[in-house]
């Protein structure tokens, strides 16, 4: 079946450091891929998405590229801020089926 | 748009009591989802509705859980009787229909969640 694997957290960085959160997926065909972010005490919010191979999703300085050859959708940001501290979820959707979420990766950014 | 509205935000109850969680989806969204989030199991889809009809309830853990959507603007998730292992954050989310999703609309909009503690 469809599944998403994310790197274990927490990821602890200093402000202005480079961020990578790895995400790989298992699915037949060409799923759509997403990153959601959950700030403390809030629900999940869509951060970015890509719907076909080689697409790059971007938002708020975050980027992720849909890599079919490596079945990956790694999240990156060149310079993190304290306000980026949150839990990040990778997810996929095939056709209109339910979204399948990864387990989430907590990011902690210190000043 | 007020977004997806959930109530209550926090609920503390005793084992055996009935719990009702409420959700108001975004107006015009055709799909409504109930998720449960725990440290142990992460984010689990419990059930989802399309045009008020339950489509997939395979994630509902057991008969103690039930969900209804009597109209397009309201859904409930009920646990009766509640148990301590039901303690979790329950999220409601809504989504536009498939055509609008492929045109670039947001896939899921989540509410802020209802934190349930069963003692």
Image (cartoon, coloured by chain):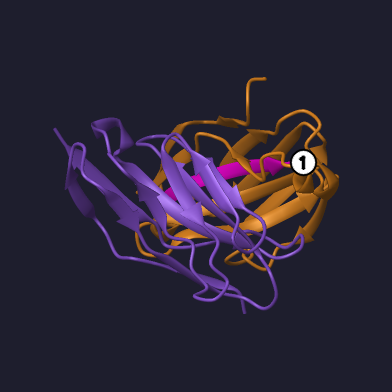
Where does the image place residue B63, in percent across and percent down from the top left?
64, 65
Asked if one can make out residue A51 in the rendered structure from this viewpoint, the answer is: yes
Q: Is residue B101 above or below residue A103?
A: above
Q: Nearer the viewer, residue A78 or B7?
A: A78
Residue B78 percent location from the top left of the image: 62, 48
Q: Chain of mark 1?
A: B
Quadrant placement of the N terminus of chain B: top right
Corner quadrant of residue A48: top right
Question: Whole-percent x and y of residue B58?
Answer: 67, 68
- In magenta segment, residue B91: yes
Which color is chain A depicted in?
purple
Identify the residue under disc 1: B96
Helix, strand or loop at label 1? It is loop
The region drawn magenta spans: B88-95
| Residue A74 magenta-highlighted | no
Left or right, residue B36 beside residue A31: left
Q: Position of residue B48 (x, y in %)?
A: 71, 54
Say which residue appears at 74% left-offset and 34% top-offset: B74
Q: Badge 1: few (under 14), some or many (20 or more) residues near its Cα, within 10 Å?
A: many
Q: In orange, which chain?
A: B
């Amino acid at each position: 079946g469809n599944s998403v694997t994310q790197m274990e957290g927490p990821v602890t960085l200093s402000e202005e450091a480079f961020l990578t959160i790895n995400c790989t997926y298992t699915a037949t065909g060409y799923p759509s891929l997403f990153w959601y972010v959950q700030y403390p005490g809030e629900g999940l919010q869509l951060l970015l998405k890509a719907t076909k191979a080689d697409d790059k999703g971007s938002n708020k300085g975050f980027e992720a590229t849909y890599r079919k050859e490596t079945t990956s959708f790694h999240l990156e940001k060149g310079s993190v801020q304290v306000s980026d501290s949150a839990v990040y979820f990778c997810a996929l959707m095939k056709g209109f089926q339910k979204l399948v979420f990864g387990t989430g990766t907590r990011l902690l950014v210190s000043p | 748009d007020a977004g997806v509205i959930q109530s209550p935000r926090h609920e503390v109850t005793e084992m055996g009591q009935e719990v009702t969680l409420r959700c108001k989806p975004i107006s015009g969204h055709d799909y409504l989802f109930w998720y449960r989030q725990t440290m142990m199991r992460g984010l689990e889809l419990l059930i989802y509705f399309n045009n008020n009809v339950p489509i997939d309830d395979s994630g509902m853990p057991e008969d103690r859980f039930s969900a209804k959507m009597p109209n397009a603007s309201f859904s409930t998730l009920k646990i009766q009787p509640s148990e301590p292992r039901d303690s979790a954050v329950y999220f409601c989310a809504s989504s536009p229909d498939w055509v609008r999703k492929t045109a670039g609309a947001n896939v899921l909009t989540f509410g802020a969640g209802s934190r349930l503690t069963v003692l």
